[in-house]
Image: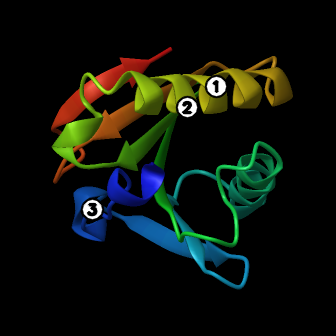
Amino acid sequence: MLLGVVYAVGTNDIPNGTTKTYGTIKNQITYEKSIPETEIDKLAAALTQVTFFDESVAKEVYVKKIGDAYQISISCNASAKGNNEALKYFTQVKTDLQKLYPKNKIVIFLVVDSLDNIIQKIE
């Protein structure tokens, strides 16, 4: 199901961003340099723990932190909009991450083609 839903967005969408890869399949997190690398490593471990990052399909997320809130953008194709199965999956990822980060608000944005084109906000 997610094979056709998750895509990549250009890293130019995060000015002053940097990218780290995780696992043998090279899942990626692109993030603002103002976020310490140790926090990004912990977030990558959490994404692995909730089985979003896995070793079957490489995924890429974009992370901003505003105050104590993590905004995680996941690039997908337009078919994710209104796709109940996809929305249920991403809502579960958000719920599972929130349990691991009780002191931080987790917000997931599903985006198409660019980080500005948000088709779904999950909070």
Q: Is residue 38 above or below residue 87?
A: below
* Image point (28%, 60%), residue name: 15
The secondary element bearing badge 3 is classed as: loop
Judged from the image, the secondary structure of the residue bearing numbered disc 1 is helix
Disc 2/disc 3 C-alpha distance (Å): 20 Å
- How many neighbours does mark 1 have within 10 angstroms: few (below 14), some (14-19), or many (20 or more)? some
Q: Amino acid at mark 2?
A: Tyr
Give the side of residue 38 with respect to residue 2, left or right.
right
Q: Nearer the viewer, residue 73 or 80?
A: 80
Discs 1/3, front: 1
Sequence order check: which comes first, mark 1 or mark 3? 3
Q: Residue furthest bottom?
A: 24
Amino acid type assigned to the residue bearing label 3 in the image:
Val
Query: Where's residue 35, x and y in %?
Result: 60, 51
In this rendering, the answer to whether 68 lies above or below 36 is: above
Mark nearer the N terminus (2 vs 3): 3
* Residue at x 76% of width, y 55% of height: 48
Q: Kindly identify the amino acid type of the residue bearing the numbered disc 1.
A: Gln
> Do labels 2 and 1 touch, CB within 8 Å?
yes
Look at mark 3 in the image and give the residue it sits on. Answer: 9
Locate residue 26: give its quadrant. Answer: bottom right
Q: Is residue 101 above or below residue 7?
A: above
Residue linked to disc 2: 89
> What is the distance, in whole Å, between disc 1 and disc 3 at their CAs?
23 Å
Q: Position of residue 117 (x, y in %)?
A: 15, 38
Looking at the rendered structure, the number of numbered marks drawn on it comes to: 3
The image quarter in which residue 97 lies: top right
Q: Which mark is residue 114?
A: none
Front-most of 13 and 26? 26
Q: Which mark is residue 92?
A: 1
